[in-house]
Amino acid sequence: MIAASLPDGRLHLQHGPIDLIVEAFGAESEIARAYEQAVDRFGDVLPTLVAELPLLRRPVGDAYPLLQGPVARRMAAAVWPYRDIYITPMAAVAGSVADEMLEALMRGRTLDKAYVNNGGDIAFHLAPGHSLRAGIFVSALDGAVTLTHDRPVRGIATSGWGGRSFSRGIADAVTVLAANAAAADAAATVIANAVDADHPAIERQAARDLDPDSDLGELLVTTKVGALPAEIVRQALMCGANQARRLQLRGLIDGTALSLKGQWWLETEAAVSLEYQELVFSGRR
């Protein structure tokens, strides 16, 4: 396990596949104690998850009643609203770890703001009057979101076919704002799966053939997205946007930005400031 202070004052925590960047703002004494709390909590996260991994790879309806660990329960709670489709708690693992570590960081502490970044899935704390700016990356810094205390957003996550996890859709990136990182992670997975189309330039393979331990089993996942006609791109983005809109109406998310082949679609509350650099909102309503 790695627990190291970076030159710029951030904290780096790494254990197996979990790789976190943690940063807190406030009084130096409070930051120091917050970092100590995070380090103390971190050592147990991966072993506890590994102990329940067979359950976490099962559909959430089967797994939820049997899960015991706090991170595992967060994972299951985040994907539970989607139990009518095939989904396992693994769809929210990165966000759930970020939420758990933020809770440990903040326990009993007074900080202006703080965040835990787990590979782009971020849980954050904001005290009144404070804000946080997060970048949105696809091929470069394509945009940014300014998060403020007065909005009910405390998590941000991104999913897409070229990311760390398999995707059944073709989105380059789907970034979701939600009440916590676990909820954002689960929703980003669901929306990214919905950004989809049939075209010869899209290649898929059974998840199990790529990773024998994948929770997706025989389901097909995207392995390549070649050149697509503009109309196919637009239709795929519309499918994802419709799913995002449904989740927003259910109160599961606060906003979404979807990207495919350089085209973007935005679904968000007007009060959340999403700022993009030279983006084309193809087909935006």
Image: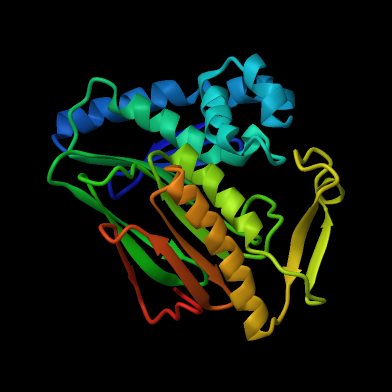
Q: Is residue 49 above or below residue 130?
A: above
- Percent from the top left, x then y, of residue 86? 72, 40
Q: Residue at 64% x, 36% y: name it.
A: 90
- Percent from the top left, x then y, of residue 127? 18, 38
Q: In which quarter of the image is residue 41?
A: top left
Q: What colouring style does the render use?
A: rainbow
- Percent from the top left, x then y, of residue 163? 61, 57
Is 76 situated left or right of 211 in this image? left
Is 202 situated left or right of 97 in this image? right
- Percent from the top left, x then y, of residue 154? 34, 42
Report the residue that reaches farthest toward the bottom: 229
Q: Residue at 36% x, 32% y: name it.
A: 102
As rendered, which of 101 and 36 lies closer to the eye?
Answer: 101
Task: Please indicate, yes or no, whether residue 62 appears anywhere in the rendered image.
Answer: yes
Is 253 situated left or right of 55 in this image? left
Q: Quadrant of residue 81?
A: top right
As rendered, which of 213 and 271 lies closer to the eye?
Answer: 271
Q: Residue at 52% x, 20% y: name it.
A: 44
- All told, the count of numbered labels is 0
Q: Quadrant of the C terminus?
A: bottom left
Q: Is residue 73 above or below residue 218?
A: above
Is 274 situated left or right of 164 in this image? left
As rendered, which of 32 and 250 lies closer to the eye?
Answer: 250
As rendered, which of 24 and 90 lies closer to the eye?
Answer: 90
Task: Please indicate, yes or no, whether residue 24 appears anywhere in the rendered image.
Answer: no
